[in-house]
Image (spheres, grey):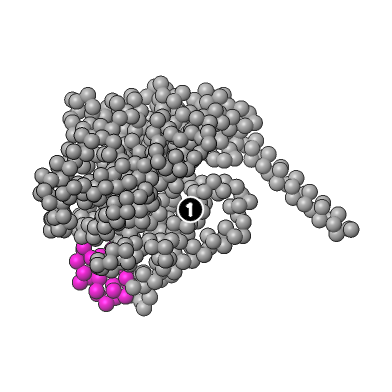
Amino acid sequence: MVLVKLLGQLAGSICVGLLSYFLWRLYNARLVFWRLKKLGMPMPPWNPVLGHLLVLPAIIKHLPKDVQQSWIFRCTARDFEASDGLHYIDLWPFAMPMILVTDPLIANEVCVEHDFGKPEMLKPFFSTIVGGDGMFTMNGAEWKKSHALFAPGFAERVILERMGQVVGECEVYVERLRNEANKGEIFSLDELTCDYMMDVIGTITLKYVEFALTQDMNVRFHSLTSRSDPLASAMRDQINIHVRDEHMNPIKRYSPFQLYKEHRNSHIMDSYITSELHKRYTDYLSSATNSKSLADKSIIDLVIADHMRDRPASATLDTDFIKWACAQIRLFLFVGHDSTASTIVYSLYLLSKNPSALARLRDEHTKVFGPDVSTAPSALRANPRLINQLPFTTAVIKETLRLFPPAGGFRGGEPGTYITDSHGKRYPTEGTGLNVLHNCIHRNPRYWPQPDAFVPERWLVGPEHELYPRTKGAWRPFEYGTRNCPGQTLVMLDAKVTLVLVAREFDVRDAYGEWDAENRREGGVKDVDGERAYQVGKGSAHPSDGFPCRIEQRVGS
Ligand code: HEM
């Protein structure tokens, strides 16, 4: 009896303690905004207890449940379109205090002029997927060192040398599309393209696939990502765990089962990458790496060589290097594969909705590669620079990235550092996350004529033309400044190669109508401003419901 009473008292004390801690944090979070409001900082109507949480329900009810967060913020931003394109938002306890940036000039200030670092709040999300500190969330000397080691591997010259690998993976992807065309059923283009991109990124960064096409495409395809492949399936599972709604629920999030799954996935990924690193190091020691051409080296081959430059060779790689390298490879696989896949899927979708652009793109491919579609892979292998002769294809990809940017910029404010707008008004950044909303900037009507329309031609005209973007930095899918995306050359190469090999052979048609008829969502909103393929948050932003589609092989292709 006494024990029960004691346990009851203990539980009571813990509850009171937790409640006091919560109230203290709440008070501090709201105090920041009370001060900002007093200073006249731009923000939606604010409540001293609930912050801006009351603003959201009215917005969310007009949006699909799974819409990517930046589209929710686009609605709060609309009230500030006439201002200088930033406002504060207080969503504690669900997010840290944020400044939402919707204007390119402010975004330049955040990412280029001040070059703010990455905030701590990004780490918990990334570290569970990446298994440590990845380049994305590092700051200071640690980031500089990692950046310096990887940057040469992503240089344009090096990436162009990997054309054979990219074309090879793409041929396998095309073979899978042929299978889907033969079956004639609805399938998820997003899922298939994610698998394909996981192979590409794995090959380029780690190269544990010794590239050799077998005759049996079903065996070869997704050696990296087949269900039985440990690295890819562990990575996909880890991402899925963290992007599900339940992630917001601390009871489910920290349940022993969930934690065990996370730990297991992490272990599988690290063991796999470690074993590959050892192989690469053995190659390095035997000078096999040196005798390889650049085209046959992975980015990690280059990094190992660089890392060992001033060190005496030992029998095995040092454990600190292995730990660091595992985190970086996991980061590349994570941030690289799904954002590129989403760009490819949206490009094919937008082309399917714009027949004249599709016809012009096909013409361009025929002019550069000749009328026989099947010769394009060998032409690209023989002369990778042909990929730089496709201005319209490049314009299509840039326009796709403008309308459907897969990512955004996120930085941490600093004490005593202010953003200054064009009127000289100063905005404090201390304690805030600076969220640069690419979807808003890319459709900001101040800078973009026909902001919501797909107009690839705008990328082919000069500054005197009315379609020309009205300011520098209005297009920033890869961000600017020192923390911009190192993978952007690879992304453009992947997307161009894919369009060259796919667009003339297939017609892609979205199947949302049929899909919706079979998957009823009673009363639920299914579009964003009339767009059914709206972006959902799944790591980076993807087309909703995996982009259900049908695909047909074109006659004579
Ligand atoms: C369409 C595809 C991609 C898009 C739109 C994209 C976008 C971005 C953006 C916006 C950032 C900066 C984020 C910020 O400022 O907070 C970034 C950073 C980064 N991206 Fe990408 N990315 C793509 C593909 C890739 C690929 C293929 C890789 C590597 C294989 C990659 C690796 C990275 C890394 C390592 C960083 C962190 C850089 C640093 O902090 O120094 N990304 N990406």
In the shown orientation, is residue 152 left or right of residue 135? left
Q: Is residue 320 visible?
A: no
Q: Nearer the viewer, residue 369 or 419?
A: 369
What span is in magenta? Answer: 280-308
Question: For residue 317, what is the image quadrant?
Answer: bottom left
Question: For residue 482, what is the image quadrant?
Answer: top left
The number of numbered discs placed on residues in the rendered structure image is 1
> Which residue is depicted at the point 82% across and 51% down?
9
- Above-or-below relation of 431 to 82: below
In the shown orientation, is residue 308 left or right of residue 28? left
Can you give x and y, in whole percent of width and height, for residue 350 in the image? Answer: 29, 38
How busy is the neighbourhood of tag 1: few (under 14 within 10 Å), some, or many (20 plus)?
Answer: some
Q: Is residue 254 visible?
A: yes
Can you give x and y, in whole percent of width and height, for residue 237 in the image? Answer: 47, 57
**Residue reaching furthest right?**
1
Q: Is residue 387 magenta?
A: no
> Which residue is depicted at the point 67% across and 42% down?
22
Q: Nearer the viewer, residue 473 or 68?
A: 68
Can you give x and y, in whole percent of width and height, for residue 109 in the image? Answer: 37, 34
In the shown orientation, is residue 511 left or right of residue 52? left
Residue picked out by circle 1: 240
> Which residue is depicted at the point 68% across and 39% down?
23
Q: Which quadrant of the figure contains the N terminus?
A: bottom right
Can you give x and y, in whole percent of width and height, for residue 92 in the image? Answer: 58, 38
Q: Three-letter amino acid code at disc 1?
A: Asn
